[in-house]
């Protein structure tokens, strides 16, 4: 009985697994070869993953601190388009007790102020540093300082303004 049930269930499952197939139909009418062309296509939606630096504590009197690296980790990008990363910051660390007391700083990439960069392929990256002059440290008041850095990431047409890293 178990064998019969297993055979019947197998037969029912086999009949239930149907697959629809579409095919171009070629009909031979006069004995001459017929030719039919078919198209194979695929579609990939644009997608990307970007890593940006995280919160950091700058050590007192240190004139250059590694801030982290912007990395285009994964990317499926349309031709003529880029992932653009822009940075906005005041450039002033503000004293929490008195925000008129500040320490000037710069966020640099390769010794130049970082404003924006365009990326076209996974693996491209830009290491950043936070630079504070010795003079700025010497003139600073005691206390806790902070500022907010804003990264804006967008998917845009190639501008040609920024070279790829």
Image (spheres, rainbow, N blue to C red):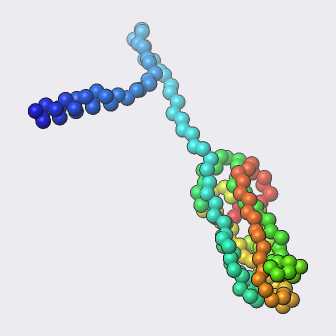
Closer to us: 87 or 35 = 87
Closer to us: 160 or 94 = 94
The x, y position of residue 8, in whole percent, is 19, 29
The x, y position of residue 163, in whole percent, is 75, 61
Name the residue located 50 percent from the left edge and 25 percent from the top edge: 37
Quarter the N terminus occupies:
top left
Q: Quadrant of residue 133?
A: bottom right
Q: Is residue 74 left or right of residue 24?
A: right
Q: Is residue 126 left or right of residue 101?
A: left
Q: Residue furthest left?
A: 1
Task: Say whether residue 47 is visible.
Answer: yes
Q: Residue furthest right?
A: 100
The x, y position of residue 108, in whole percent, is 76, 73
Task: Say whether residue 163 is visible.
Answer: no
Q: Is residue 92 left or right of residue 158?
A: right
Q: Is residue 57 above or below residue 54?
A: below
Name the residue located 17 percent from the left edge and 34 percent from the top edge: 6
Quarter the C terminus occupies:
bottom right
Q: Quadrant of residue 162?
A: bottom right
Name the residue located 79 percent from the left edge and 82 percent from the top edge: 132
Q: Is residue 148 above or below residue 4?
A: below
The x, y position of residue 40, in whole percent, is 51, 33
Q: Residue furthest bottom?
A: 138
Q: Residue furthest top?
A: 30
Q: Is residue 126 above or below residue 154?
A: below
Name the residue located 89 percent from the left edge and 79 percent from the top edge: 100
Q: Quadrant of residue 94?
A: bottom right
Q: Is residue 81 above or below residue 94?
A: above
Closer to us: 26 or 75 = 75
């Amino acid at each position: 009985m178990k064998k019969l049930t297993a055979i019947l269930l197998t037969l029912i499952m086999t009949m239930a697994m149907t697959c629809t197939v579409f095919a171009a139909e070629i009909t031979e009418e006069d004995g001459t070869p017929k030719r039919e062309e078919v198209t194979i296509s695929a579609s990939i939606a644009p997608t990307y993953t970007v890593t940006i630096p995280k919160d950091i504590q700058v050590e007192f009197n240190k004139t250059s601190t590694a801030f982290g690296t912007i990395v285009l980790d994964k990317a499926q990008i349309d031709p003529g388009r880029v992932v653009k990363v822009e940075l906005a910051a005041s450039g002033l660390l503000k004293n929490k007790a008195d925000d008129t007391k500040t320490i000037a700083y710069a966020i640099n990439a390769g010794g130049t102020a970082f404003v924006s960069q365009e990326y076209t392929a996974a693996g491209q990256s830009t290491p950043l540093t936070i630079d504070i002059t010795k003079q700025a440290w010497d003139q600073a008041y005691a206390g806790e300082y902070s500022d907010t850095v804003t990264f804006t990431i967008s998917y845009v047409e190639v501008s040609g303004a920024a070279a790829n890293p």
